[in-house]
Every structure is written in C-alpha cells, then in structure tokens.
Image (spheres, rainbow, N blue to C red):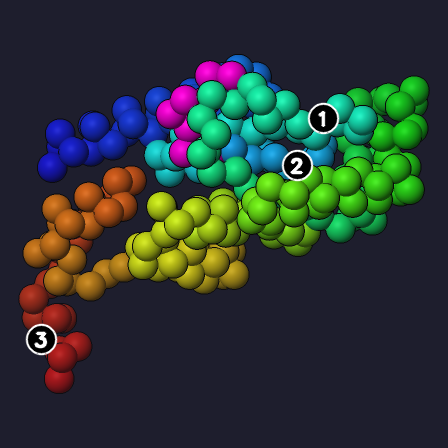
Amino acid sequence: AQHKLDTAYFKRMAAVEYAVVHDDGLNIENLHDADMLLVGVSRTSKTPTSMYLGHRGFKVGNYALVPNVPFPIEKLPNKNIFIVGLTTDPKRLMQVRKTRLQHLSDSNNATYADIELITNEIREARKLFTQHNWPVIDVSRRSVEEIAAAVAKSNPSKRGPEMVFDAFLSSYAKGRGKSIYGLKTPWNEFYAEEILATFDDAIFLHVMRDPRKSALSAM
C-alpha cells in the first residue's frame, strides 16, 4: 500500500510540474503526452484549474487567447489532444479584470477591462470553440474544484463513475465549508486496493473505538 501511495504521489507531482511548464501557452509544441488543453481568454481560471487537475494526476496545458492573435493550432504536436474551451460572463470578467488592474496598480491598460472589448473577446472565443467542436464550460460562479470536475467529466476517455462520485462529494463538502470529504464506512478496509487504484490520493485513517460503545450504538 505504501508503494502505491509513493507512486501516486510522484505521479501527481510530475503532473503539477507539467502544468507549470505548459502554462499560458508555454511549450505548446511539446504537448505530445498531454491529457488535455484548456483554452480561454485572460482570467478564466485556466491556470488554477490546470494546477488542480495536475494534483489529480492529469497532465494539462493551457493557452490564453489574445485579441487579434489566431490560435496556433498548427503548433500542436498531437492533433487529437482533448481541448476544452473556458468561457464566462462578460460583466463578471470585467470586474475580475478591474480588480486585477487595481491589484497591480496598472492605470495604463484600461482596454483590458473594457466591457465592449471583453464581450467581443468572449464572442470570438466562442466562435473558435464552435469551429473546432470543443466542449465549452462556463466558469462563472464556479469554484476551481467545480470547473476541474466539469472539465474531467467532459473528456470521454477520462469519464467514469468515480469522477461523478468525486464531483458530487466534493461539491457536498464545499457547500458545508469543507475542503475535503470522507467516508467512514467500515467496509472500506476490505476494498483498500481498489479505492487506491481509483482515487490515488485517498488517505486511510484507522480510528479505534470502545467496543462497548459500538455495541450500545447498535441497540
């Protein structure tokens, strides 16, 4: 079991490094073994989603669309790479970008948060997604965890009941102010290998309880 945990850990760390090396269009020509590529305009949660998916073991790159700059699809080494388009509400994106400019004390880039230009950016991005028949995910009012779950579920080669299970319980935990979820079913110990094979970042906690209290709770 320890060997499986070590292997899973290093796999995730390698995937996180992959996301860093292929962030924001970097090394797009080297995405030979990528599981997926996220594409969207600036500030649509591409980087944090890539990093989160990396922690889940997915090798993910992302590319930021720039106005009047064509998407360099000819540079992709793998034409069958799974690509997901990320979009958002223009007004919400305007607020995000305004906050970004204020944080950077940048007063020389007003067009970055111009609602008309943003609306056009979103429109052109949608056209690109439609042209290539890429699945599209609206990141408005979604947490990074929810975006990542939606991305993973949209990939036919990665879709499975375990992803739906994880997405459901992650959302359940988040709704109660928790960052992780747990199951205390005693039968889990008999399926440890299967659980670790499916959820490679699962952690088992062995809890001891007074048998007399266990007996009383069953009465």
Residue at 16% x, 33% y is 4
Question: Residue 101 location, x and y as percent?
Answer: 82, 28
Which quadrant of the figure has residue 126? top right
Residue 190 on image: x %, y %? 8, 56
Quarter of image, res 117? top right
How far apart marks 2 and 3 lie (CA) works out to 56 Å
Q: Which sits in the foreground, 215 or 88? A: 88
For the residues marked 2 and 1, what is the alpha-carbon distance in whole angstroms? 12 Å
Residue nearest the viewer, comparing 17 with 137:
137
Circle 2: is it few (<14), some (14-19), or many (20+) Cα within 10 Å?
many
The amino acid pointed to by label 2 is Gly
Residue labelled with disc 1: 70
Answer with left or right where residue 210 lies relative to residue 62.
left
Q: Name the residue under label 2.
A: 40
Query: Which label lies toward us, 2 or 3?
Result: 2
Q: Give the range drawn in magenta.
A: 29-36
Q: In this figure, which residue is indicated by the disc labeled 3?
A: 215
First in sequence: mark 2 vs mark 3: 2
Q: Tell me: 204 left or right of 13.
A: left
Is the residue under label 3 in contact with that under label 1 (CB below 8 Å)?
no
User: How much space separates mark 1 and mark 3, taking CA atoms?
Assistant: 68 Å
